[in-house]
Amino acid sequence: MKIKISHPLGTGQSACTGCGACAAACPANAISLQPDDEGFLHPHISGEICTDCGLCQKICPINSGLLANDANDSQHRADHLPAVYAAWHRDDSIRFASSSGGVFTALAENILKEGGGVVGAAFDDQLVVRHRLAQTLADMDRLRGSKYVQSEISPAIYRQIHKLLHDGRNVLFSGTPCQVASLRNFLVKDYDKLFCCDIVCLGVPSPLFFARYVQYNIVRGKRLLNISFRDKITGWKRYSLTRHLHGGISKSIDIFADPYMLAFLRNFALRPSCYNCKFKSTLRHGDLTLGDFWGVAKRYPEYDKDDQGTSLVLVNTEKGKNLLENCSPHLFLGSADLDTAIAGNPMLIRSANFPPERNTFYHDLQVDSFAMITKKYRLFQPSFLRRVFSAGKRRLIGTLNVCSN
C-alpha cells in the first residue's frame, strides 16, 4: 500500500515557497495551508481525505521542474534576453504614490478598462497581506505599493482567475516569480488573455514576524491602521517608512531606523526557500518583470533627474510587449541594457545570502519580546556619534592597510 504523504514535497519541504497552488488544485479538498513555527504557510495533506491522485505533486512548480534557473543552456539564454526599459507614469500624482515609477498602475488600468480583473497583494483590514481580485479602479488602489511580507494566495483566488479566463476576460496577475510560476502550473495551459508580471524579489519575511511588529507598535501606543513601506516624502532613492496610525496620524521614519525593515534588508527573516531560490534568472515566467531601476543614473543620467522614481521593466514575451505598448501613451519608456539592470538589481539572478543570524532569529522571536529581538539583533539605527566613529575607524583601518602593503 502506498504511504500517504503529509506534504507535496515530502522531506524536501524546505524548498516549498508556500504558493498554495497544490491546495487550489486538489480535487478532494484534502490540502490546507497552515503556518509552521516561523509563521510561513505550508500545505498539509489530510491522509483521511487524500485519494493519492498525485496532482499536488504535479502542480507544484518545484516538483514539476518549472524552474527558471534550470534552463541554463547559454545559447537558449542568448536567444531569450529580455528587452529592458527605464519607465515611469506620466501622471506625477500616480508616480509619487507608487513605490517606483508607477508602471503597474498603467498596466492595471489598461486591463480594467477592457473589463478585465487585476490580482495582486494587498493589506486586509487586519493588516494581513493577501492576494485579492480587483475589478474597479477603487479596488486596484489597494494593490499599489510594496508589501514586504509573504502574501497568501487562497484557493479561491486561483479559482477566480481561472473562471475569469474561462469567461474570456483579461487578467493581470502580479506576484513574486515563484507565485507567477505557480499560477501558470495551476492553469496547466497558457491563456491569451492572461498577463503576468513578476517582481524583482529579495525574499519574503513571514506573516508571523510582521504580526509581532504590528503588536510591538500597539504596545508602544501606536495602533497601526496601515503602513507604507516605500514613502517618497524624502525621495525615491532614500525612501521612508510611514506608519498610518489610529486618529488620522501618520509618522514617517528612515527605513534604517525601523526594526522590521532592518531585519528584512539584512536577510534575517526570509523564508528558507528564498536563500536558494529556483526562480532567479533572466528567463522569467512573467510576461513583464517590474522593479526599481536602482543605479540607472550611473549609465543613463537622463532617466533619473528628479528622484521621483524610475521603474525597471523587462519585456519577456511578445504578449508583455503588446501590453506595454498599449500603455505607452501613459508612460515614459527609455531603452536600457540588461547589464545595467542586473548591476542595480542583482536579485534578478542571485538568491539572498544566508546570514548566521538566520539560524536563531525565528526561535528567538518565539520566546523573546520584540524589544529584546530589536536589541539582540541590533535592529536600530546607530547614533550619529557612533556612525561618525565607525566611519573614522574604517578610514583608519584602510590607511593602516595601505601603509602595511
Image (cartoon, rainbow, N blue to C red):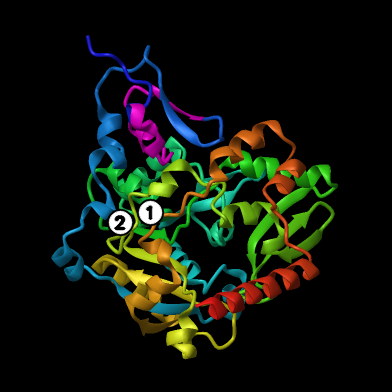
**In this view of the protein, which residue sits in the foreground, 120 or 361?**
361
Q: Is mark 1 on a helix, strand or loop?
A: helix
Numbered mark located on residue 84 in the image = none
In this view of the protein, can residue 147 be seen by the observer? no
30 part of magenta stretch: yes
Quote the CA–CA distance across marks 1 and 2.
7 Å
Percent x, y of residue 112: 45, 62
* Left or right: 157 as drawn, with respect to 325: right
Residue range (magenta): 11-35
The kind of residue tagged 1 is Pro
Instruction: Identify the residue at image location x=73%, y=50%.
Output: 225
The residue that disc 2 covers is 285
Q: Where residue 81 sits: x, y (%)?
A: 24, 70
Q: Which dot marks residue 177? A: 1
Q: What residue type is labelled 2?
A: His
Q: Residue 169: say if magenta.
A: no
Residue drawn at point x = 30 percent, y = 56 percent: 285
The crowd level at tag 1 (other Cα within 10 Å; few <14, some 14-19, many 20+) is many
Whether residue 346 is situated above or below residue 117 in the rendered picture: below
The image quarter in which residue 4 lies: top left
Q: In which quarter of the image is residue 249?
A: bottom right
The quarter of the rendered structure image containing the N terminus is top left
Q: Is residue 234 visible?
A: yes
Could you tell which of marks 1 and 2 lies nearer the N-terminus?
Answer: 1
In the picture as drawn, the residue positioned furthest to the front comes out as 404
Image marks 1 and 2: residues in contact by CB distance under 8 Å:
yes
